[in-house]
Image (tube, rainbow, N blue to C red):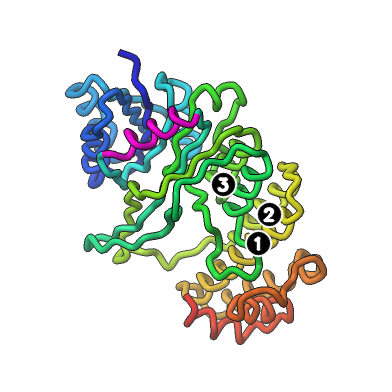
Amino acid sequence: MKPKISVVVPVYNVEKYLGRCVQSLQNQTLHEIEIILVDDGSPDNSPALCDEYAGADSRVKVVHKKNGGLGMACNSGIEVATGEYIAFCDSDDWVDESMYGVMCDMAAKYGADMVFTGIRQVDQNGIETPMSEADELKVYTARKEVEMFAMDMIASSPSVGVERRVPMSAKIVLYRRAFLVENNIRFESEREFITEDLLFNLDCLSCAKTVVEVPQTFYNYFINTASLSRVIRKDRFEKIKTVFFQLLSRYKFECPEFKTRCYRLLSGYTRVALCQICVSDLPLSDKRTLIKQICNDSVWPDFRRDYPVKEMVLSHRLFQFLILNRLYLPILLIGRFKR
């Protein structure tokens, strides 16, 4: 029997959590499911575990490949998927048992190219934190509606406190497989772009005709707060700028707010990057050097000219004021507390 849905699971160095993820997929109320485990050259026991699951359950398919990163692993899964719909699940996360049944029903009912649900964060102690969920069922069919939905994924308007209303994660979206194939939509490498999910979803929203938001949360995003790293990448800001300029050059959204939302993304990502620098294990001299490089970057004069800084919420406006005026020491001090 042809599966209704193919769930692609990139697997890398997750032997401790893989069983929980796979079991949550096997226990779905929707039985017509194909589980595609993509072993991305994992150095631990994960490849053997993948083969064990495939041997015990005919719904499990395994792809072994050379390490290429998360985005490329997802693409490998797309290539072998046979379901009417495709979804993605990180191998250290898990989903509620009714997730894909509900999403497939919604997709079929409204003829949707994409169906979105909410997401919650769960830490190592089992403490749940809601991250995002639509307040009601929403069906977008007009091009302007779909574009505004895309804007809410890029970033919020300047006066809104939360960074974005719609999560950019591809793991909480159901995609019609024929839609991805017809439009040749694939993931970029996260080694080139730090937000490969955002680009993938915006590629989809650029040509989607029907998008549905379901006011329910099924996806459990696991975060181990006890092992959060204080090591940072010194090229983080350059990666952020790459995404910013890629958005402006890649998409032709007609929404007049498009450039403003892209600037909001730049501002928000930069604020987080600066806070990460401030609380990192880097020597103080390196922190000051990185902060100066960011504040002196040529992107900020245009930002000052084109972005309505006065409309920003107070805390964001204060931090942006420090960046635009190159006030390095206050950034270093405030960044430690804000993070």
- Judge whether 308 appears above or below 48 on screen: below
Q: Can you tell which quarter of the image residue 252 is in? A: top right
Give whichever of 102, 97 is nearer the camera.
102
Residue depicted at x 45% and y 65%: 231
Residue 275 position in % (x across, y down): 53, 73
Horizontally, is 301 left or right of 103 in the view?
Answer: right
Give whichever of 203, 174 is nearer the camera.
174
Q: CA distance from mark 3 to mark 2?
A: 11 Å
Tag 1 or tag 2, which sits nearer the N-term? 2
Report the magenta residues as a range: 98-110
Residue depicted at x 76% and y 64%: 299
Horizontally, is 231 left or right of 250 in the view?
Answer: left
Residue depicted at x 26% and y 22%: 59
Question: What predominant SS class does the magenta segment belong to?
Answer: helix
Q: Are marks 2 and 1 in contact (CB under 8 Å)?
A: yes
The type of residue carrying mark 3 is Leu
For disc 1, the marked residue is 266
Q: Secondary structure at mark 3?
A: helix
Residue 197 position in % (x across, y down): 52, 44
For disc 3, the marked residue is 198
Give whichever of 292, 197 is nearer the camera.
197
For disc 2, the marked residue is 244
Residue reaching furthest to the left:
56
Q: Secondary structure at mark 1?
A: helix
The type of residue carrying mark 1 is Leu
- Judge whether 213 appears above or below 302 on screen: above
Tag 3 or tag 1, which sits nearer the N-term? 3
